[in-house]
Amino acid sequence: MALAQADMTLIYKGTDITKQVDIIECVCRDVSGSESDCLNLKVDHADQWFRWGPQKNDTIQVKRNGYDSKTLYLNTVIPEDGAYRILATGAKSVPFSARWQAFEKKTLTAIMGVCAGELGMGAKQFGVNGGITYEYLMRNNMSAPQFLEMLCNREGAVLKTLDGSYTAIGVQYAQGLSPMHEMELDDGQMDSVYIDRRDLSWASVQIKTPFGNGTARDSNAQGQSRVITDITVDNDGHAYRWAKGMLIMHNRKSEMLKIEMDFNPGYTAMVRIDVKSKTDAKGQWIIEEAEQDLVNGRTRAKLYRCITSVS
């Protein structure tokens, strides 16, 4: 059953325009990792709004009963069956130019600020030490988002767009927060899928270079061991930190849970969910991506198992 538009608020460039349009469809996708948050919105009676002359990268925001998409940026407006489909993203629509760039004695905070600023975005860190200093770090012909994601992953963090900023969120930090929701999951529940690929987990990662050597191990994994020799580190501590981050980021994907339920506004990327179940899905999970259908009142999510066995 579709929800009343009165439950929703549509904000365009800081102005509430909910009463000027009829919202036909509204799906917000909140993700962590390589993709940006996005909004797929279909509205009718948008003629008055269109007279404002919407431009690419205008800000747009949707709220409903505790859910808040935060700041998104207009990407595309498409006429469709007498209405308009509006697509918005968490990152601004600007050229993601690949380039070479060297950083010497720069902190993670400074590097993220430079790269995010290149795209007209801010930069933040949660659960990651922004004061980490790199003696020498090279951006090898990569776009700013590609480079930042690689760097964050090595530090054991995801990179996501959040309210106008590229944001690094430490996986172990997110796992340590209190659960947003405790849910019960039974064998016969049709709106859940559990996928087990622990056979693909790595037992260890070793970074071995002339300047630093470090090894991280997963006590719960029986898979292969990886030895990496083609990245630059400053010392043994740096090598271990990156080995641990890379092992966490790989192995956390070995168990996945997909769920669908009635609308739950608390389901957003990188929040923890605890599952009570008699199945193998029992335990602690982190939301990797969440899709909120604000018109039809449905929530879909993909989660990864919390991983605490890496040291």
Image (spheres, grey):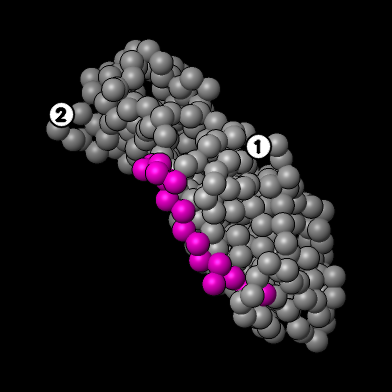
Q: Which mark is residue 45?
A: none
Rate crowding at label 2 as few (under 14), some (14 to 19) or many (20 or more) other CA atoms within 10 Å: few
- Can residue 91 be seen here? The reply is no
How many dots with numbers? 2
- Residue 176 at what x, y percent from top left? 73, 45
- Residue 79 at what x, y percent from top left? 20, 35
Quadrant containing the N terminus is top left
Q: Which mark is residue 179?
A: 1
Q: Residue furthest bottom?
A: 210
- In the rendered structure, are the residues bearing label 1 and label 2 in contact, judged by CB atoms less than 8 Å apart? no
Q: Which mark is residue 82?
A: 2
Amino acid type of the residue tagged 1 in the rendering: Pro
Vertical comparison of 211 with 186: above or below: below
User: Which structural element holds mark 1?
Assistant: loop
Front residue of 173 and 47: 173
- Residue 209 at what x, y percent from top left? 77, 84
- Image point 37% across, 12% down: which residue? 6
Q: Is residue 177 left or right of residue 212?
A: left
Amino acid type of the residue tagged 2 in the rendering: Gly
Q: Quadrant of residue 274?
A: top right
- Image point 64% across, 75% down: which residue? 222
- Can residue 169 be seen here? The reply is yes
Front residue of 71 and 262: 262
In magenta, the rendered stretch is 187-203
Rate crowding at label 1 as few (under 14), some (14 to 19) or many (20 or more) other CA atoms within 10 Å: some
Mark closest to the chain's N terminus, 1 or 2: 2
- Residue 26 at what x, y percent from top left? 34, 31
Front of the two marks 1 and 2: 1
Quadrant containing the C terminus is bottom right
Membership of 191 in magenta stretch? yes
- Image point 59% across, 53% down: which residue? 305
Q: Is residue 129 left or right of residue 187?
A: right
